[in-house]
Amino acid sequence: MLGLDIIMCTFSVLSVAARADFKARNCSEVREACVGKGFSFAHVPIQEIPGEHLRVCPQGSTCCTQEMEDKFGQQSKQDFENLVDEMSHELRSTFVSRHERFDEFFLELLENTQRSLNEMFVRTYGKPYMQNSEVFENLFAELKRYYMGGNVNLEEMLNDFWSRLLERMFTLLNSQYVITEDYLECISKYTDQLKPFGDVPRKLKAQVTRAFIAARTFVQGLSVGREVAQRVSKVSSTPACIRALTKMLYCPFCQGMPALKSCRNYCLNVVKGCLANQADLDPEWNLYIGR
């Protein structure tokens, strides 16, 4: 297929050149093409003129003034940057929508869990629970902070939760005694040996840690993808890139052949040169997508 593309491309170039040969001195087709693309030039030659003034396009007989070549360069830059932005719009939108949907889902799930647990404990334990509910409120606040990217050590936070819960429960169950802070601290140190809550803390720690690490990693991954796509879509065209784009897109205008289209391989080479910095991200991006 590649050989066929080259043959067809060569044929199209030769055929257009042949058609243009007999009207080499007439620039009316160029004038019409410029109007069709919205260019407003102060002057477009009626017939070809010497092209010594050109800095990008061939300097033979030409249909372009210096003003035209300059504007073609500006338009090439704008066309390319708009195209890259347009082509990456869907990718950026996908990351934004997926991030928003997952974030909304997970936070709603966390909020519903807290609400259900609170309602159940209120019905079951009543006032004793309500007087100590901040222990659970702090737990969910820390879990949310971890998910949102906060500096929270899950294992330490969960250990502290069970220690505080043990202290509160021990105090409630022994309200007839005066229990000092030192005594409560001593009890907390032997939580692992005493196992007042059985195997529940260990199982819950494993489940919560696994779920929240996965959720935070996933949502942060979506955020990274969104930021990378956003930055890559903003192309800063170099002078060499603009020259190459102008030669490919608009120099045919100056040669009296505005309908001439570039070959596929030529176009690919120009685009690769203009996106050289973005191309360096390709291996890392593929690894990111694969995960």
Image (spheres, rainbow, N blue to C red):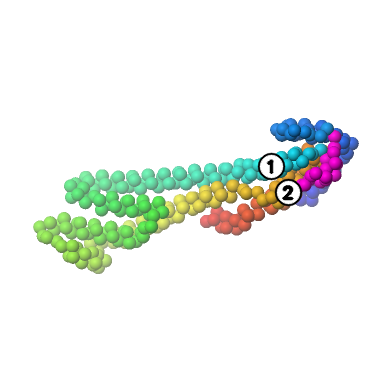
Query: Mark 2: which secondary structure?
Result: helix
Which amino acid is tagged 2?
Answer: Ala
Q: Is residue 34 above or below residue 230?
A: above
Badge number at residue 74: 1
- The residue depicted at 59 percent of the width and 47 percent of the height is 234
Q: Is residue 49 magenta?
A: yes
- The residue depicted at 67 percent of the width and 41 percent of the height is 79
Q: Main secondary structure of the magenta part?
A: loop
- The residue depicted at 71 percent of the width and 51 percent of the height is 240
Q: Is residue 110 above or below residue 28?
A: below
**Residue, far left:** 176
Q: Nearer the viewer, mark 2 or mark 1?
A: 1
Query: Mark 1: which secondary structure?
Result: helix
> Label 2, on which residue?
244
Q: Is residue 138 magenta?
A: no
- Image coordinates of residue 213 in percent, x first then y, are 41, 56
Bounds of the magenta span? 47-62
Q: Is residue 227 visible?
A: yes
Which of 69 and 291 lies nearest the eye of the viewer? 69
- Image coordinates of residue 194 in percent, x first then y, are 23, 66
Left or right? Give the position of 156 relative to 5: left
- Image coordinates of residue 71 in percent, x first then y, are 71, 40
Which of 123 and 9 lies nearest the eye of the viewer? 9
Which amino acid is tagged 1?
Answer: Gln
What crowding class fits label 1: few (fewer than 14 Cα within 10 Å), some (14-19), or many (20 or more)?
Answer: some
What whole-number distance in Å separates the C-alpha atoms at marks 2 and 1?
A: 12 Å
- The residue depicted at 83 percent of the width and 40 percent of the height is 62
